[in-house]
Image (cartoon, rainbow, N blue to C red):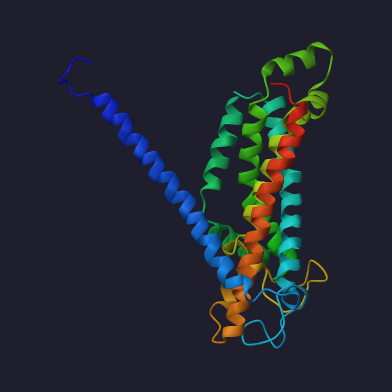
């Protein structure tokens, strides 16, 4: 560069570097602010009794008890919905990548539809689940909530798992077929084993979304002080506990809501950390 000539490219680079640093600080700062606020309000009320007892005298106006019903309900809901979504998602993803082919027109249409479904607000899924529940003659229950959340998780899980399988090199497919393997054998003995780190991450990501969603279960799960004994019983969840109890006029009930928020935050963070550890463990056997 000649002396006295202003370098606009270097200025542009510095400007975008500053914007990236500011964006990173905003994201990290927001995360720390949320975690810090929830922790500060929840730690003071969190106790063994809070984790091992159900609400006494009503979840909205009852002053005693804990949030055990919401913890158990959330775990049942998350595991049930994720298991149901996985049972549907894995065959769809295998069909897209092995049987149809990655670039097939049908596969592109399915991916486009999944992208659209991913962008639909969760309250719409809740309304759909409510209408489906009425059509089938069901009432608010754990089973209805599991079906609704599974539908919510389907596009998330399918698209995430699909992107993972698309990263498997085509040479692995060709090598498997050249050895006489069928499509089904290639899918389960080769492709799934190569993509298993990303598949586990996709499942746990969907689980975290499902266990933390409020709108999807607002009309379908109901709310109760009791632990559900079957799929036909109403179920409390941690997001619903936060939603209902924060509006209570009793400070002790509002404290339970912050304890529920802290427990939910810990569960989601734990799932994220575990998914990374599991993914790293299985990545050792992946062919790059």
Q: Residue furthest front?
A: 3
Q: Closer to the camera, 71 or 41?
A: 41
Quadrant of residue 172 in the image? top right
Q: Residue at x 68, y 58 (%)?
A: 267
Q: Position of residue 128 (x, y in %)?
A: 59, 60
Q: Closer to the camera, 22 or 184?
A: 22
Quadrant of residue 174 in the image? top right
Q: Residue at x 68, y 18 (%)?
A: 170
Image quarter hosting the C terminus: top right
Image quarter hosting the N terminus: top left
Q: Position of residue 20 (x, y in %)?
A: 40, 39
Q: Position of residue 196 (x, y in %)?
A: 74, 34
123 relative to 199, above or below: below
273 relative to 173, above or below: below
Q: Is residue 220 visible?
A: no
Residue 70 in the figure: left or right of residue 246 = right
160 relative to 261, above or below: above
Q: Residue at x 66, y 48 (%)?
A: 272
């Amino acid at each position: 560069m000649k002396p006295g000539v202003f370098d606009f490219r270097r200025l542009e680079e510095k400007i975008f570097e500053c914007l990236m640093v500011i964006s990173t600080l905003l994201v990290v700062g927001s995360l720390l602010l949320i975690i810090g606020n929830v922790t500060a309000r929840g730690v003071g009320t969190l106790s063994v009794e809070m984790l091992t007892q159900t609400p006494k005298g009503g979840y909205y106006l009852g002053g005693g008890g804990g949030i055990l019903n919401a913890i158990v309900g959330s775990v049942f809901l998350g595991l049930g919905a994720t298991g149901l979504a996985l049972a549907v998602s894995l065959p769809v993803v295998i069909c897209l990548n092995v049987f149809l082919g990655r670039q097939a027109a049908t596969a592109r249409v399915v991916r486009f539809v999944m992208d659209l479904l991913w962008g639909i607000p969760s309250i719409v899924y809740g309304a759909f689940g409510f209408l489906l529940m009425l059509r089938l003659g069901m009432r608010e229950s754990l089973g209805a909530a599991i079906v609704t959340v599974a539908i919510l998780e389907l596009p998330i899980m399918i698209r995430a798992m699909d992107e993972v399988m698309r990263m498997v090199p085509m040479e692995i497919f060709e090598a498997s077929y050249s050895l006489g393997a069928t499509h089904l054998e290639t899918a389960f003995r080769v492709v799934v084993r190569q993509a298993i780190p990303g598949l586990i991450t996709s499942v746990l990501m969907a689980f975290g979304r499902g266990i933390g969603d409020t709108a999807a279960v607002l009309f379908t799960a109901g709310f109760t002080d009791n632990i559900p004994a079957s799929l036909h019983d109403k179920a409390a969840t941690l997001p619903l506990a936060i939603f209902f109890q924060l509006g209570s006029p009793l400070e002790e009930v509002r404290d339970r809501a912050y304890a529920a928020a802290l427990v939910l935050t810990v569960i989601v963070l734990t799932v994220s950390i575990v998914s990374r550890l599991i993914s790293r463990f299985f990545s050792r056997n992946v062919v790059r």
